[in-house]
Amino acid sequence: MRLALRELLRRPGRFVTATIILTLVAVLVMFLGGLLDGLIRSSTDAVRAQDGDLIVYSSTAQSSFLRSRIDADTRATVGAVPGVAVSGGLGLVQLGARVPGNGPRDLAATALFGYELAPVGVPDPPGPGEVFADDVLRADGVEVGMEILLGPARSAVTVIGFVADTTYSGQGSLWASAATWREVLAANRPDEQLGDDVFQALVVRAADDADVAEVAAAIDAASAGATESLTITQAVDAIPGVEQQRSTFNQIIGVTIAIAVVVVALFFALLTVERLGLYGVLKAIGARSRTLFAGLVVQALVVTAGAVIIAGGLALLLDAAIPPGSIPLDISPRRILTSAVLLLGAAVVGCAFSLRRVLRVDPASAIGTIS
Amino acid sequence: MFLALKEMRRAKVRFGLLIVAIGMLVFLILFQQSLQNSLLRGFTGALRSQSAPVLVYSTDGQRTLQASVLTPELEGLARAADGVGVVGRIGQGTFTVTAGGSIAEASLVGYDTVGLGSPEQLDEGRLPEGPGEAVASAEDADDGFDVGDVVTIEPGGDELTVVGLVEDAQLNVGPTLFVTYDGYVAAVAARNPDAGTPLPNALGVAPADGTGPAELVASIDAQSDDLDALTRDQAADEAPGVSQVRQSFQVIFLLYALVVPFVTGLFFLIVTVQKSGALTLLRAIGAPGRRLVAALLVQVVVIVGLGLLVGIALYTPLTVISATALGIRFETTAVIGWSVVLLVLGLVSSLLAARRVLAIDPVLATTGVGLR
């Protein structure tokens, strides 16, 4: 093991190219993972932030706010279900916002939510015509105290504060009272307007002692199948495209990790071939195959760890360099750590390709092979 | 040459691993190229497949058909612009439908004038003749959207009979139905009884004689900052998300394409160093440097070529079975293009090894130094 580390210190040059290749592969894995995280976060944060146990949609909505409709009768039915502590209406309309100081064609993409139960990090519903804005909208020039105009009807709302991590469908969210949302919806989307007591969905908090899954089933049973009740996690996963994005990206990341395995296998197979004579001598003087192979694994782990550290830095730089609104990249320490673990695992697996060759080295071959 | 091939036969594991590595990289590049094209087709295919040469959105729509709403005032301004020939209303929304016995999400595109929002070219069947008929995206025919199938709007229960199919005409990567404008308005009312009469999401405009689409776009845009006119190709290329998808995949392709020459270059450099003794001996007994380099290049071409074959062999069945349900199809242009690029990159990457071969001094064979 010490020999392996000493070789790395004394002859780093021979490991440089392998490190560069693994760095590229690691950047790829982190970039792909960051892209997946960014895409999903920007689409789902507003749902994830809901401070409840369940979201209740109408059964034909397929978890789409815009196609869901919960009327007063259904809401009363939901409220009467044992285990339901409290429910709050939720509605959404996606509109372009005219921000003072921006050009007449330079609109900010916004998702205006009307809510009754405050999501995590969002204060209680503001007064009429007031909104809390997600802080991604700062990039569009939105400021506290500013009046912005929503949609073709130029519905005026005043930003009274910022909230974080509540984007929806890639758009900066605005959080308003139910009345403000209803007014803006009717003015700008006549085909989507809803009656005074109708919401698109309900956020439900279960009683402390209630089983959430049982409450969800009871709500759907009580509404005679008119509703579909999902936990927050289920609602996030049910947002169109989320599952498909996750599975496709994970498959691509999996194949990229497999490439890392092959790259490590190839490099250390070549190194092993080069060292067969040396291994013969080491075995002849008593070194065990296990020790020699452990040396290879240590070298692979050190090279990969170096590559992962460089790649982590590069990925963070890339994340910082990409302007907001272009590629939805979100490189988090967790993603870097996960990628590192996967790549280090790939390094160990890749080394295993050289195990057979190390085991087959005959100590007797040392005689006359080293000059 | 003979020696080059024989060496590869004798070191099957080493060369095999390189072929596998290149093959997997080629597979991923081709798969992602197809994925990108499939996503873009799925996002905006309907915009390219519809027949209006110019689409007029409201600026508020930010180039998303569903988000755009044209008030009567804006519609009047667009109709009054210079160079406008014929104008038709287009409505679009996303609906829950029952098709083939399953609940699905479908986009409806309603048009009131044939040739201005209707499918430009049908692959099967005919255009709708009334509110209860639709032309569907051909990609979804097997999921209950084939000619003769009945699609039900949920809730409400309005029925649409599919009377035609059109290829590459999806919106939002899902089933898309082209219906008459009346059919679209009826579907909106079926979905939401509280809904008012929908305003058109866009206008399809044909230029008057003597006016080109670009000229018409400028003329309509000049009417108001709230109007956003686009040619058909612009509407597809500049739809939200398209440039992000392209940029994301470009970064991915760049990184994968860099890995290929690095792996190939590293491999041949190490192999060249390892066999420098044999190469020195060959030079000493009269083998010209260029012949040794030619042998190296033959190995590179064979290895990259086999890697390409492995990658294409992995990619082809995926495009046949469409394993990701994303409508991935075999892209001949991408296969040829990437094959050429990766072969060239592979050859370029072997230049370091070739330089090393050419630098071998045959005299070293006499001292033994070059034979270590």
Image (cartoon, grey):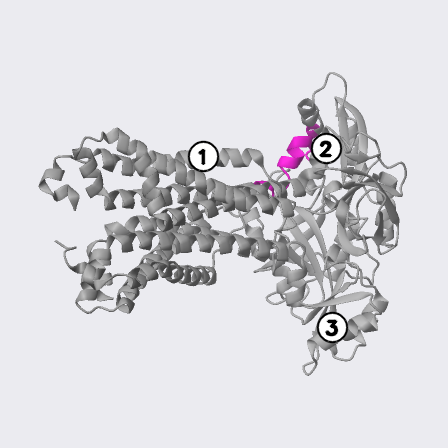
- SS under mark 2: strand
What's the residue type where badge 2 is placed? Leu
Quadrant location of residue A3? bottom left
Q: Which residue lies furthest to the left in this view?
A: B367
Labels 3 and 1 within one chain: no
| Left or right: B311 in relation to A282 | right
**From mark 3 to mark 1, how far is it between C-alphas?**
55 Å
Q: Which residue is drawn at 23% across and 55% down?
A: A275
**From mark 3 to mark 2, how far is it between C-alphas?**
45 Å
Q: Which residue is denoted by mark 1 in the rendering? A: B341
Q: Report the chain holding disc 1.
A: B
Question: As rendered, which of B173 and B300 lies closer to the eye?
Answer: B300
Quadrant location of residue B169? top right
Q: Which residue is denoted by mark 3 in the rendering? A: A216
What's the residue type where badge 3 is placed? Ala
Look at the numbered discs 1 and 2 and tell me whether their residues touch, using CB distance below 8 Å. no
Q: Which residue is drawn at 79% across and 46% down?
A: B145
- SS under mark 1: helix
Give the mark toward the camera: 1 or 2.
Answer: 1
Q: What stretch is highlighted in magenta?
A: B221-244
Q: Which residue is denoted by mark 2 in the rendering? A: B55
